[in-house]
Amino acid sequence: MSAHAKISTAEELRSRIDPARVPEHVAIIMDGNGRWAQRQGEHRVVGHSNGVKSVRDTLVGATEIGVRYLTFYAFSTENWNRPQAEVDALMDLLVNTLMSELDSLNENGVRLHTIGDTDSLPASCRNTLQEAIRRTAHNTRITLTLALSYSARWEIVRAARSIAQDVQEGRLAPSAVDEALVSSRLSTAGMPDPELLIRTSGEQRVSNYLLWQIAYAELWFTAVLWPDFRKEHLFQAVLDYQGRERRFGLTSEQLDPA
Ligand code: FPP
């Protein structure tokens, strides 16, 4: 496909998106980097570095259509068990990408945020993240959240522990524990729940990602491997989302009484 044809496809897809019904928060499980690299006879790490191009293009696409929160599963708690060389390469990639993209994040109004057990990241990574978060804190167009050393069960256990502590020490009555309180103790406190969850590479599971927050999210799976994912795919997912009826447990008739 020529570059021109590709651009008009993106524009054509974008023109069909209803700006009034764009999901406020899109969460993405980037999967398939290793397979993408292996198919080309390259080391898995080459897949991760090409995946950064997809992060950039998706972020651009998300800002074009007015998504306010974009959350990437960049490194799960379980990913620590990968070969040390791959873990190190992912950490280096994160640091180098943040440093090289910082000006561009600022030019495009992107506020950087992280969720997860970031204390467990190497010091160089933590410092670069802290610096990038501080230097983008004033931006308001879109919040780019990287889930790093993240797992949903980890954050739910942490929230339960902090609530239990408050109850034990008399600061909180058990009857005051409700959904809003639990949400406020998660690492996504203050963010709207994702309305749309995308996973690439053909796998159809949620892999310990935002389990509380995706209670009502629409799920969109694609066989495209993450390094091949571009804003066109995001636009397709949003169009598909806009064609679905979100019922939240109600009937169609209740949602649209004729
Ligand atoms: C899953 O593919 C991908 C990851 C575990 C890491 C994703 C990270 C990046 C694309 C870099 C992110 C960088 C920034 C700055 C956000 P996989 O390795 O599980 O692929 P496979 O299933 O084919 O083996």
Image (cartoon, grey):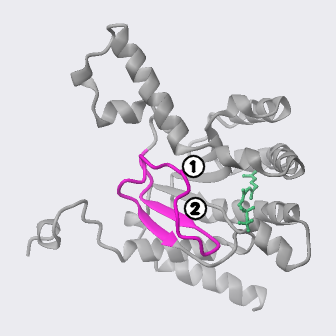
Give SS at disc 1: strand
Answer left or right for 203 relative to 55: left
Q: Which residue is mark 2?
A: 62
Category of crowding for the residue at label 1, using alpha-carbon neighbours closer than 10 angstroms: few (below 14), some (14–19), many (at least 20): many
Which span is picked out in magenta?
192-220
Q: Which residue is mark 1?
A: 142
Specify the farthest residue to the top. 169
Tell me which amino acid carries mark 1: Ile
If the image is split into quadrants, where does the C terminus sit? bottom left
The reply to whether dot 1 and dot 2 touch (C-beta < 8 Å) is: yes
Residue that appears at 86% across and 60% down: 45
Q: Is residue 220 above or below residue 8?
A: above
Residue 217 location (% of width, % of height): 40, 59
Residue that appears at 88% across and 79% down: 40
Category of crowding for the residue at label 2, using alpha-carbon neighbours closer than 10 angstroms: few (below 14), some (14–19), many (at least 20): many
Q: Is residue 87 above or below residue 232?
A: above
